[in-house]
Image: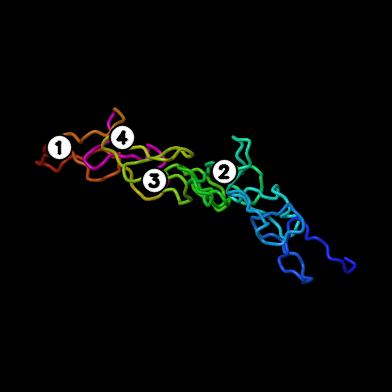
Amino acid sequence: TNGECVACTAGTFKSLSRTDGECTTCGSGKYNPVTAQTDASACVNCEANQDTTGSTANDHDAETDCKCQVGYTPNTMTSTTDCVVCATGLHKDAVSNEVCTTCKPHSTTSGSASAGHDNPGDCKCVAGYTLASTGQCVACAAGTFKITSYDDRACSVCGTDKYSSQSATSTTCNSCPAFALTSGSSATDHDAVADCKCAAGYTHGASGQCEVCASGMYKAIDNSNDACLACKSNSQTTG
């Protein structure tokens, strides 16, 4: 100022003598609380898992400018300034000492590395839920299931002889009653126990269960509660 040489401010340094160049701001993840520093070594590294933000001297002139990196949050279990990875189900995508943010409903994070907690996109749907076009995790529809957690894949339709009549907890499908099975490949073909119908050779009996056709009777159709048919004249079934 006014042609006079002034000391480099805290947060900066200048190593070249006999030059009028500007002082250099400490780099990312470094700070310097002392004025008139002549070497880059005066810039001190932040503690592990911490970083600085901004490019002005004021952003690097005190240890308090060091804040937890993305995916990390202050350790509330100790009195120290150390940063720890966000817990399961939490994320943080900014350098700050704020607490981690809870994932959207019915989603979670995975792993113990910060890379699994440093973005809202790290939150994946839990078992029984799938990612909708709205970006939210929604319950698997009745007739479908999803057994895996921490993924956004679509729910799968229950298999043959299986059904699921409820959503929200559809991580597995129920087995049809004995000698009954389902048919079709859509969710509506597997969304109620009523979709389970008697296999070939069985009919829906008075007990409400599938019963084997009586002697001299048959049924060739699968997935049907139709009555068994009488054999043609002078013919018989066996077994």
Sequence-first tag of 2 and 1: 2
Q: Position of residue 221 (x, y in %)?
A: 25, 45
Q: Secondary structure at mark 3?
A: helix
**Residue matched to label 4:** 177
**Residue matched to label 2:** 84
Judge left or right: residue 25 versus residue 163: right
Q: Position of residue 154 (x, y in %)?
A: 45, 51
Asked which quadrant contains residue 235, the reply is top left
Amino acid, disc 2: Val
Judge left or right: residue 80 versus residue 141: right
Q: Callout 4 environment at 10 Å: few (<14), some (14 to 19), or many (20+)?
A: some
Gap in angstroms between the C-alphas marked 3 and 4? 16 Å
Sequence-first tag of 3 and 1: 3
Gap in angstroms between the C-alphas marked 4 and 2? 51 Å
Chain part drawn in magenta = 187-206
Gap in angstroms between the C-alphas marked 2 and 1? 75 Å
Q: Which residue is located at x 67 percent, y 56 percent?
A: 43
**Residue matched to label 3:** 189
Q: Callout 3 environment at 10 Å: few (<14), some (14 to 19), or many (20+)?
A: many
Q: Secondary structure at mark 4?
A: loop
